[in-house]
């Protein structure tokens, strides 16, 4: 007779199970519901997300718990990541019905695809062995390849899907090859024993090669230079709500996983991987900001900005102390609020022919759409790291952690790059508030329900940016109670 499974160990995975059931329900509902299907599917998706969010709060783990023979491990840190991913997912689903109806994008599979990708994001920080890590990475990535090309009527959307799939496949291959090298040289799939073997091994060449391949694959996923070339075209061509979900969710999940991978699994080899991450951080910050200076497309500017922010987050990986880990999670939350809000506004301005807005079209926006202009200004100031915004607290914490760890040169590079970024962010603010409108500029959304989802998401994100900037202590207290 087989022993009963340890249900207590599986209880922290209840939110992930609810999201899985929600995705299955969406697939079935898509086949069964015809009339008012879009609204019904969105309601099912939001119900599953709400249930998962409540369940995650109720089963918030006070200590780590292992499941599936230690392949997955949940704790307060992974639970916080799940809550942020669920919040980003909910905001994206709120935008989806109005956006895809406006863009005349056929098909209703995007809700199930969003939930499946979010499931991978929730589980990725929990992975403690290589096969689970690979499966979670693919759960995140494969639905996003499809979603990137969902605007079938726009040629740029199909191009975005192709350009995302090819580097994504290479990244997955790097991760799998790296895992194969590590397993072949250690005889185990679990991160902790691999780290211990790295510490004791006399010949570390093949182990370090496996680690390098693994890190290269993750660097592709978060677009660290020189693994970044795919990102601007993908961000520009993907549906704007999906771009916001991709920009925020993938960064949260992958950097959270990288923290665990390096700070827990491969801490014994820190002297080897720190130098590589140091170089990637410097290159990513500098190139991302310099290339953003010349962008006229708001989506491409935010894409290069995303690359630069990946460089700032890599500073935390280099420091790899407790302060850096707390700072990275706060920074990721602040970045998610600003980015999802910005792409919600871009979604509002999209039409059936184009899903982007250019700098010249932002001229005089404060007169035509004062609330939208104010919200966009707040998001840009947060991305700069302006005082009284969430981005300021995130950058202050991150840079302080780098200083405490003794990486003064890296800190100087990060500060200088933050100063450079002021130019291209405030150029948008100048267009909105200081330049007269041009003919053919961004038109106001029609009044009424059609514009409501974009407005609500932008307002929620703007409130989060201000609240975390003015009164961050509540979130910092929660973060400080979590172990790493």
Image (cartoon, rainbow, N blue to C red):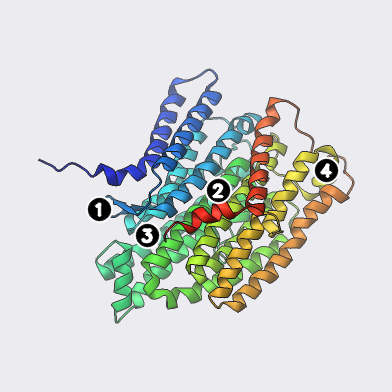
Residue 465: % across, % down: 65, 49
Q: Residue furthest left?
A: 1
Q: Earlier in the sequence, mark 4 or mark 1?
A: 1
Q: Earlier in the sequence, mark 3 or mark 2?
A: 3
Q: Tell me the quarter of the image containing the C terminus.
A: bottom left
- The answer to whether mark 3 and mark 2 are in CB contact below 8 A is no
- The answer to whether mark 4 and mark 1 are in CB contact below 8 A is no
- The answer to whether mark 3 and mark 1 are in CB contact below 8 A is no
Q: Earlier in the sequence, mark 2 or mark 4?
A: 2
Between marks 4 and 1, how big is the CA–CA gap?
57 Å
- Please name the residue that numbered disc 3 is placed on: 176
Between marks 4 and 3, how big is the CA–CA gap?
49 Å
Q: Residue at x 40, y 61 (%)?
A: 175
Residue 275: % across, % down: 50, 76
- Please name the residue that numbered disc 2 is placed on: 246
Q: Is residue 109 visible?
A: no
Between marks 2 and 4, how big is the CA–CA gap?
28 Å
Q: Residue at x 48, y 53 (%)?
A: 253
Between marks 1 and 2, how big is the CA–CA gap?
31 Å
Q: Nearer the viewer, mark 2 or mark 4?
A: 4
Q: Is residue 188 left or right of residue 124?
A: left
Residue 368 lies in what quarter of the image?
top right
Query: Of the numbered discs in the image, which one, if any, rests on residue 366?
Result: 4
- Please name the residue that numbered disc 1 is placed on: 69
Mark 3 secondary-structure assignment: helix
Q: Nearer the viewer, mark 4 or mark 3?
A: 4
Residue 19 lies in what quarter of the image?
top left
Dot 4 crowding, Cα within 10 Å, few <14, some 14–19, many 20+: many
Look at the picture and state if 69 lies above or below 370.
below
Q: Nearer the viewer, mark 3 or mark 1?
A: 1
Dot 2 crowding, Cα within 10 Å, few <14, some 14–19, many 20+: many
Residue 386: % across, % down: 71, 59
């Amino acid at each position: 007779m087989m022993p009963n499974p340890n249900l207590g160990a599986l209880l922290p995975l209840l939110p992930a199970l609810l999201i899985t059931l929600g995705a299955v329900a969406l697939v079935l509902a898509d086949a069964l519901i015809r009339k008012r299907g879009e609204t019904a599917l969105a309601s099912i998706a939001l119900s599953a997300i709400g249930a998962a969010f409540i369940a995650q709060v109720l089963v918030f783990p006070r200590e780590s718990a292992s499941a599936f023979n230690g392949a997955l491990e949940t704790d307060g840190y992974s639970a916080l990541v799940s809550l942020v991913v669920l919040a980003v997912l909910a905001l994206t689903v709120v935008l989806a019905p109005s956006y895809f109806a406006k863009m005349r994008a056929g098909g209703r599979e995007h809700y199930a695809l969003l939930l499946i990708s979010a499931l991978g994001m929730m589980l990725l920080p929990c992975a403690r062995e290589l096969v689970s890590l690979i499966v979670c990475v693919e759960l995140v990535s494969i639905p996003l390849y499809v979603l990137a090309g969902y605007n079938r009527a726009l040629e740029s959307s199909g191009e975005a899907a192709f350009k995302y799939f090819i580097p994504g496949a290479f990244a997955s291959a790097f991760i799998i090859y790296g895992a194969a090298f590590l397993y072949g040289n250690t005889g185990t799939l679990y991160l902790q024993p691999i780290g211990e073997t790295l510490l004791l091994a006399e010949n570390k060449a093949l182990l370090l090669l496996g680690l390098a391949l693994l890190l290269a694959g993750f660097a592709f996923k978060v677009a660290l230079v020189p693994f970044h070339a795919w990102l601007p075209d993908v961000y520009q061509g993907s549906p704007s709500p999906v771009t916001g979900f991709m920009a925020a969710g993938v960064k949260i999940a992958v950097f959270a996983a990288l923290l665990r991978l390096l700070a827990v699994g491969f801490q014994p080899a820190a002297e080897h991987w720190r130098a590589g991450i140091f170089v990637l951080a410097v290159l990513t910050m500098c190139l991302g900001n310099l290339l953003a200076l010349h962008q006229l497309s708001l989506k491409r500017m935010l894409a290069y900005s995303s690359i630069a922010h990946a460089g700032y987050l890599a500073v935390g990986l280099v420091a790899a102390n407790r302060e850096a880990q707390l700072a990275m999670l706060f920074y990721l939350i602040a970045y998610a609020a600003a980015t999802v809000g910005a792409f919600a506004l871009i979604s509002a301005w999209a039409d059936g022919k184009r899903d982007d807005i250019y700098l010249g079209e932002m001229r005089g926006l404060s007169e035509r759409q004062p609330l939208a202009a104010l919200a966009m200004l707040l998001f840009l100031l947060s991305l700069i790291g302006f005082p009284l915004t969430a981005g300021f607290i995130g950058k202050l914490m991150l840079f302080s952690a780098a200083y405490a760890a003794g990486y003064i040169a890296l800190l100087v590079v990060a500060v200088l790059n933050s100063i450079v970024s002021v130019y291209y962010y405030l150029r948008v603010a100048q267009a909105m508030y200081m330049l007269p409108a041009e003919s053919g500029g961004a038109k106001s959304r029609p009044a009424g329900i059609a514009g409501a989802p974009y407005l609500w998401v932008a307002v929620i994100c703007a409130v989060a940016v201000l609240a975390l900037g003015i009164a961050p202590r509540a979130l910092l207290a929660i973060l400080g109670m979590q172990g790493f």
